[in-house]
Image (cartoon, rainbow, N blue to C red):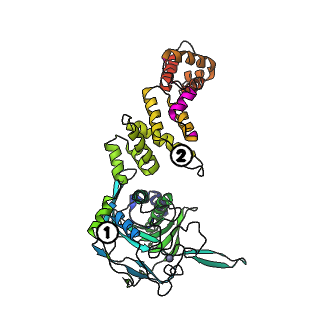
Amino acid sequence: MTAASHVAAAAAPALERYEAVIGVEVHCQLRTASKMFCSCSTDYDRAPPNTHTCPVCLGLPGALPTINRRAVEHVLATGLAIDASIPAATRWDRKNYFYPDLPKGYQISQYDLPLASMGRLAFDTSDRPASVRITRAHLEEDTAKLIHGADPAGRPISLVDFNRSGTPLMEIVTEPDIRTGEQARRYAEELQLLLRAIGASDADMERGQLRVEANVSLRPPGTEAFGTRVEIKNMNSFRSVERAIASEIERQAELLDAGEKVVQETRGWDEDRGTTYRMRVKESSDDYRYFPEPDLPPLVVEPSWLEAIRAALPELPAARRARYRAALGLSAYDAAVLVADPDASALFESVLGADRELEAKAVATWVTGEYLGLRNRAASDAGPVAVEPADLAHLVRAVARGSLSRANAREVLVLHVATGESAAALIAAKGFRQISDADALAAVVGEVLAASPAAVADYRAGKLQAVGFLVGQVMKATRGQANAAIVQAAIRARLDGGGEG
Ligand SMILES: [Zn+2]
């Protein structure tokens, strides 16, 4: 290949020349009050280091573990939610390795009998729906945390905080079914939604409750054999999952284009530089010398226990999106935005529940637009943005009937959130009544056109967006009470009809 043709090939998107084969591994901290094998509290986020410890999670000799039932239930619920197989009985295994954050010298985990296996998760992508097979979900304990810093003299030191040691952790591994960075991001987002919906985890990536790793390799399209895979770590947001994988695909494609070999290694994602970097080269697979944990009995999953967990499962995100679309007629976009936000979908359902006559589409528009807008603009320390469902129902109904303009309804909603006053009281106090009377509006439109010669000239010169300014002036003159659609039609009719203005 000449230098010129190499440049041309490298400039083309890598996924036109190669197929990417991607598997994702997620570690998620389960939502439990106490740790996996002891009664230490898991509420250590703001606690001083090494204050949530006991002989069990410090790995002191002779200390014996006891199983956290709630943690097991979270994994079983996850397994049911992803349509996985659940074994009638399983056991615990020791995964042996030496590291300063692992005081026992082994981690209690599950090896060949995970609590859930052969599941599946479906999600949407920008071009089509996708589905990923999930190899397994198993339960294990988290490690302690190493903090690397410097002592007062500036010498590098490493400290260990055992508060996290022994926290229940679920590992969820996919088959290599993923083909793009976007699919990997969407998979992780859907998994987060699912874990939150069933209450298994808060799954906050920024707080390390959801950690995503990916294995990436390339192969020529249409071939079966896997290429050399590279493991990517340190992706601390959904956006970085997508970017890191896309960047790694390009890096490997350039190597293969140049006739070089991809090295089997672990690479970290550098968010600022937008590239992956080498962390360590793996020459052989790790040998953890797994063996059954002698300090814990086998775990029997009674059918009645499993059925109770299944019965307690809430409506899952995918089912809820499907219901919003099929039964309520929402667009795929509105359904996705509502279901992605538990507060928004709760408000949406409550408003519909408060008035069965309301059009679901109109309610969805108010919740995804105005409510989420208010919440996103609210200061994070100002407390929740509280909207009474009955009051939002009142506003949506008034706008639908034409007795309140959309602009005034927005203003009332803002006041309702700020003061807690009812929508009806605020509308009465403000004296809001939508003006839809064409004759009454014609007079105001005439005044505004006379007072805005520049905008009128712009419109006549072909700048049609000048209409927006003129409508705004009429809304201002009527304190937002004019029916904007009627005003816009009236302005166009006057200006397009020629004559005055
Ligand atoms: Zn403990």
Report if residue 184 lies within the magenta region: no
Q: Quadrant of the N terminus?
A: bottom left
Q: Position of residue 61 (x, y in %)?
A: 49, 87
For residue 454, which quarter of the picture? top right
Looking at this view, is 407 or 450 the one in front? Answer: 407
- The label nearer to you, 1 versus 2, is 2
Looking at this view, is 283 or 384 the one in front? Answer: 384
Camera sees residue 466: no
Identify the amino acid type marked 1: Ser
Q: Position of residue 137 (x, y in %)?
A: 36, 69
Magenta residues?
Answer: 419-437
Looking at this view, is 293 or 39 the one in front? Answer: 39
Identify the amino acid type marked 2: Val
Going by the picture, which residue comes out furthest to the top? 499
Q: Position of residue 270 (x, y in %)?
A: 55, 65
Residue 117 disc label: 1
Question: Which residue is under mark 2?
Answer: 385
State which tag comes first along the sequence, 1 or 2: 1
Q: Residue at x 62, y 20 (%)?
A: 453
Q: Position of residue 78 (x, y in %)?
A: 36, 63
For residue 220, which quarter of the picture? bottom left
Q: Residue at x 54, y 47 (%)?
A: 376
Against 113, residue 455 (above or below) is: above
Going by the picture, which residue comes out furthest to the right? 153
